[in-house]
């Protein structure tokens, strides 16, 4: 429970920062995400009506109605894609990302400028600064993007369950049960990746130092003069290989275990389709109902998996967000009054500079 509270508080702080930077854009971001989810189910329903119209061999007057349904289906399909992919995931997301990253960068640089020298000479704090500086521009914004995805995911999940009540809720419950291991796996191996990054901070800093040697003209001149290129490049390659090996380990484990957890999902979907087709054959449901059920089932399965994966990603990113806020929350050991003070003294009348030169 304490860990859950901590993750909630971290994301609250991130959302608060984004809210303070751009309120209207953030609201529009989340609103268009939910609207995109709603529109996709309108598309499914209009598709159901279109299929039923074709199979029921409508009269001439009804044929005019079906063309109206087809036109509505195509318009809604276009509108749903435009709202979610163009407005939400492109226009608003890119604009909000630039503003949010600028805000994070300002706070990061302001904090570094205000830190005591004692912190800057502390090895642990320098490692913390290196970790934060390497990840905050994309890890922290990624959580904002994932929260937007979760709004879409939960909206779609809620609508799927409402529709499932009309058909068969059991298959949706089974899909939820078999998809749950995704969250545990992503959380476990996301934490492993962060631990690797944290425990190998010295190697990461060393890699940055080696790169700096080649990008700083003064040190680059010395490398060329003393012919040290091969020596430093070998050190860089060895450090990179070590970090890559440690980075790939949790990814391989996650992929291996995900294969087994994924096996049950298509089995559940197979029996759901098989039983629903039987209901169509005995005229309990129409062919249009079948398409509506199928689209809803696949959407539920996909969005549920996305929710679990997104929660895992948030958990992983929170570990880096925690470092960012640890840095921002550092208190200087020697807090001084920033107010100007006027020192009055009657001990001297003037100041003279003798034998001073540049």
Image: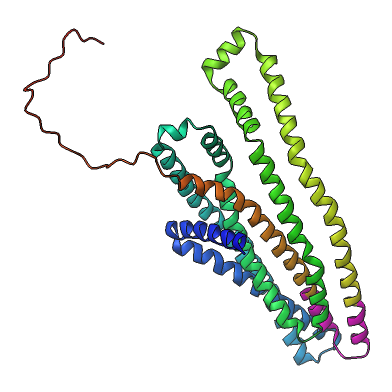
Could you say where residue 201 lies in the image, as x and y percent from the top left?
62, 35
Q: Which quarter of the image is occupied by the C terminus?
A: top left
Picture residue at 52% right of the left edge, 34% below the top:
126
Above or below, 86 relative to 240: below
Residues 290 and 158: in front is 158
Q: Is residue 294 magenta?
A: yes
- Left or right: 331 as drawn, with respect to 349: right
Residues 103 and 337: in front is 337
Determine the main secondary structure of the stretch shown in magenta: helix
- Left or right: 182 as drawn, with respect to 114: right
Residues 245 and 148: in front is 245
Is residue 70 visible to the viewer in this orientation of the structure?
no
- Residue range highlighted in magenta: 274-296
Indicate the quadrant where residue 348 lies. top left
Is residue 21 visible to the viewer in this orientation of the structure?
yes
Picture residue at 51% right of the left edge, 37% below the top:
125
Q: Is residue 70 magenta?
A: no
Could you say where residue 171 lies in the image, as x and y percent from the top left?
83, 77
Picture residue at 50% right of the left edge, 62% below the top:
26
């Amino acid at each position: 429970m304490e860990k859950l509270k901590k993750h909630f508080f971290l994301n609250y702080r991130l959302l608060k920062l984004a809210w303070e930077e751009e309120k209207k854009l953030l609201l529009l971001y989340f609103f268009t995400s939910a609207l995109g989810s709603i529109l996709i189910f309108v598309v499914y329903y209009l598709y159901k009506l279109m299929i039923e119209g074709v199979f029921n061999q409508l009269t001439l007057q009804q044929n005019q109605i079906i063309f109206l349904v087809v036109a509505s289906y195509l318009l809604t399909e276009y509108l749903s894609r435009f709202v979610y992919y163009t407005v939400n995931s492109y226009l608003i997301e890119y604009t909000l990302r630039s503003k949010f990253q600028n805000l994070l960068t300002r706070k990061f640089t302001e904090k570094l400028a205000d830190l005591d020298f004692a912190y800057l000479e502390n090895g642990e704090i320098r490692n913390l600064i290196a970790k934060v500086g390497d990840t905050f521009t994309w890890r922290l914004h990624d959580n904002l993007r994932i929260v937007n995805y979760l709004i879409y995911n939960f909206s779609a999940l809620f609508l799927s369950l409402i529709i499932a009540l009309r058909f068969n809720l059991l298959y949706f419950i089974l899909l939820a049960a078999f998809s749950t291991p995704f969250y545990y796996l992503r959380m476990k191996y996301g934490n492993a990746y962060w631990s690797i990054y944290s425990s190998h901070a010295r190697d990461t800093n060393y890699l940055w130092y080696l790169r700096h040697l080649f990008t700083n003209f003064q040190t680059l001149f010395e490398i060329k003069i003393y012919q040290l290129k091969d020596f430093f490049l070998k050190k860089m390659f060895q450090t990179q290989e070590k970090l890559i090996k440690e980075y790939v380990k949790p990814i391989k484990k996650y992929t291996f275990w995900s294969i087994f957890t994924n096996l049950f999902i298509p089995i559940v979907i197979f029996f759901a389709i098989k039983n629903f087709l039987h209901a169509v054959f005995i005229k309990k449901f129409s062919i249009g109902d079948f398409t509506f059920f199928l689209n809803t089932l696949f959407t539920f399965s996909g969005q549920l998996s996305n929710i679990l994966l997104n929660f895992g990603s948030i958990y992983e990113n929170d570990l880096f967000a925690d470092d960012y806020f640890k840095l921002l929350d550092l208190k200087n050991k020697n807090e001084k009054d920033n107010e100007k003070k006027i020192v009055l003294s009657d001990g001297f009348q003037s100041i003279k500079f003798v034998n001073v030169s540049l």
